[in-house]
Amino acid sequence: MDRGQPDENTLRAAVALACRAPSVHNTQPWRWELGEHSLHLYADRSRALPAIDPLGADLTISCGAALHHLRVGLAALGWRAVVHRLPNPAQPDHLAAIEFQQREPRQSDIALASAIPRRRTDRRAFSSWAVPEAIIGQLVADARAEGVEAEEVVGTARDELLMAIVAAAEAQEADPAYLAEIREWTGVYPGASAGVPAANIPAGSRQYGNLRMREFAPGELLQTNQLRLGEDAGSLIILSTSSDDELSQLRAGEATSAVLLEATSAGLASCPLSQPLEVVQTRELVRDQVLGGSTCPQLVIRVGWAGFNADPLPATPRRPVIDVLTP
């Protein structure tokens, strides 16, 4: 890189942070290329899940989360990311071109970046303590700052969302191709560079009150409050956009990252829930019955306080930077 631009070591450090982003079943469906004065994000379609994610929305949202993680990492390293989204219509996999402007890191930049290695997807039951309205309000504001609508789902809308989750699970679990993908990407062996390890999957029931979590391969993660699962007080925040195109999905991924990192900074546990939006019929149900037909649903994020005395979650594996970054 030229003077006035981040050097290669800085960019490698930022990409390493970006690759800590959550992705659909930890597939990490992205790749990065270094340009002379820029960095480029591409979707890696070889890691797509056609049965789980037939619309490809989960993949693009995953890449959007990595893009926001990169922005956060660069800011903490002293660089503002100037992002050009979907810069080349002739290359649909080219999701973003990033240029750089030097700037002094703020304390808030460093605090948010420090949440990246601490963030985990927590699929366990949450405690019976409700999340304060002020924190929910901040998470909603963070999503809206990324150009994405967000709201906490409560009352009858929450009931409709929970029914959509059940209906989506029943439809997917009747599909052999879906079951094959779940077996391939969850319960992965120690040493794997992708997928969800058994150590990050709760053992036993994944029915928390009236919330049904996705069924993965058998897990090894013990619940800390097995006798009180019905008292889970986790909140559900839904992200939505005015359109349902790839740019909207990319933006939704950036908003997802913003919400998850803020939640981590606040001490909350969190878990993205994409299942009700992976089936066309339940996606439409969520749009019409939960959002009133006004916006297009992109992702649900569950946040709450971890169960009392819950053990820290292990980090899920990541592909080495050398495998995802092309000089």
Image: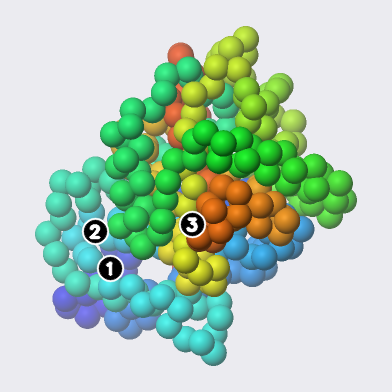
Say which quadrant the C terminus sits in.
bottom left
* Marks 1 & 3, CB-CB < 8 Å contact: no
**Residue in the foreground of this view, choosing between 81 and 190:** 81
**Residue in the foreground of this view, choosing between 107 and 236:** 236
Residue placed farthest to the top in the image? 227
Three-letter amino acid code at the position of disc 3: Ser
- Name the residue tied to disc 1: 81
* Residue 214 versus residue 21 in the image, above or below: above
* Residue 119 versus residue 171 in the image, above or below: above
| First of labels 1, 3 by sequence position | 1
- Name the residue tied to disc 2: 75
Residue placed farthest to the left in the image? 104
Tell me the residue at 55%/68% (across/down). Answer: 244
- Name the residue tied to disc 3: 240
Q: Which mark is residue 67?
A: none
Residue 70 shows in this picture = no
Q: Secondary structure at mark 3?
A: strand
